[in-house]
Image (cartoon, helix red, strand yellow):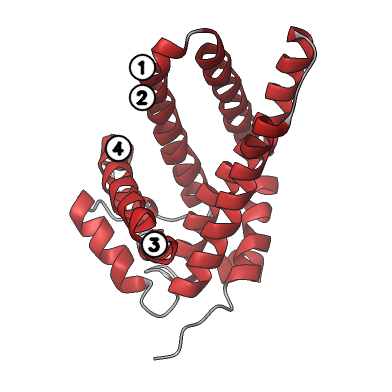
């Protein structure tokens, strides 16, 4: 079976088009991401014993923002959402948990299996919210729909991951002279890193629209 990588560039382009379509909402989401990222870093630096607690708090906020981002794009695309879509936000936590465990295990074995799992489950959250699926059903549906297109998903996921991690990794090599400079660096590094996170989340919904169950939606809006 041939694997189609041709969606990667158009999906990246269309993802930025979604951002332009509702700039106020995405600006709020982006601002919350930066604020929580800076707060997380500041607390961990000053109170390292609180690491586990603030880590869970950060994960909770990010999963909520992931659902908000996904629902915003689905609304912009005029996708008819089930009445329970907003109540399904709790299911995003289940998808996030299983996704993280599966991808993390794959990365521990070898890097490539982790990337493969991430690509095959990349559509799980949009499917969960758009189609009123259970967590296991969303993961299974994502696996089935990405069988041919997992390479496009992997390219987008890797781009988002590298974009997110490079500014954070750079922190290990930056030596700053005073507290004010530290704060500015935390602000800058989180602004760059969280942009990558937001792109990755939005791109998953764009991919869902591109070749998911409602594959014609993106073409109708951006064609």
Query: Measuring 78% from the left and 9% from the top, which residue is drawn there?
Result: 178
Query: Measuring 62% from the left and 26% from the top, which residue is drawn there?
Result: 34
Q: Earlier in the sequence, mark 3 or mark 1?
A: 1
Q: Which residue is mark 4?
A: 93
The answer to whether marks 1 and 2 mark residues whose Cβ atoms lie closer than 8 Å is: yes
Q: Is residue 160 left or right of residue 120?
A: right
Q: Which residue is mark 3?
A: 110
Is 171 in front, or is 164?
A: 171
Question: In the rendered image of this protein, does residue 213 appear above or below residue 4?
Answer: above
Q: Earlier in the sequence, mark 4 or mark 1?
A: 1
Q: Is residue 20 left or right of residue 132?
A: right
Q: Earlier in the sequence, mark 3 or mark 2?
A: 2
Q: CA distance from mark 2 to mark 4?
A: 11 Å
Q: Which residue is mark 2?
A: 56
Q: Is residue 104 left or right of residue 195?
A: left
Give the structural element (helix, strand or loop) at label 3: loop
Query: Measuring 37% from the left and 28% from the top, which residue is drawn there?
Result: 60
């Amino acid at each position: 079976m041939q694997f189609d990588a041709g969606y990667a560039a158009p999906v990246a382009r269309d993802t930025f088009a979604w951002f332009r379509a509702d700039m106020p909402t995405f600006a709020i989401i982006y601002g919350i991401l930066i604020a929580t990222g800076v707060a997380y870093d500041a607390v961990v630096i000053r109170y390292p014993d609180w690491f586990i607690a603030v880590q869970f708090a950060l994960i909770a906020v990010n999963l909520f923002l992931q659902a908000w981002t996904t629902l915003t794009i689905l609304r912009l695309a005029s996708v008819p959402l089930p009445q329970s879509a907003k109540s399904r936000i709790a299911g995003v936590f289940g998808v996030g948990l299983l996704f993280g465990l599966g991808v993390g295990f794959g990365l521990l074995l070898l890097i490539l299996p982790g990337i493969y799992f991430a690509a095959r489950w990349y559509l799980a959250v949009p499917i969960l919210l758009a189609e009123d699926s259970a967590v296991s059903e969303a993961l299974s549906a994502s696996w089935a729909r990405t069988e041919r297109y997992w390479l496009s998903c992997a390219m987008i996921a890797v781009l988002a991951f590298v974009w997110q991690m490079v500014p954070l990794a750079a922190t290990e090599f930056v030596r700053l002279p005073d507290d004010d400079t530290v704060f500015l660096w935390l602000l800058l590094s989180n602004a760059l890193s969280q942009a990558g996170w937001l792109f990755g989340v939005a791109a998953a919904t764009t991919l869902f629209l591109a070749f998911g169950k409602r594959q014609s939606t993106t073409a109708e809006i951006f064609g």
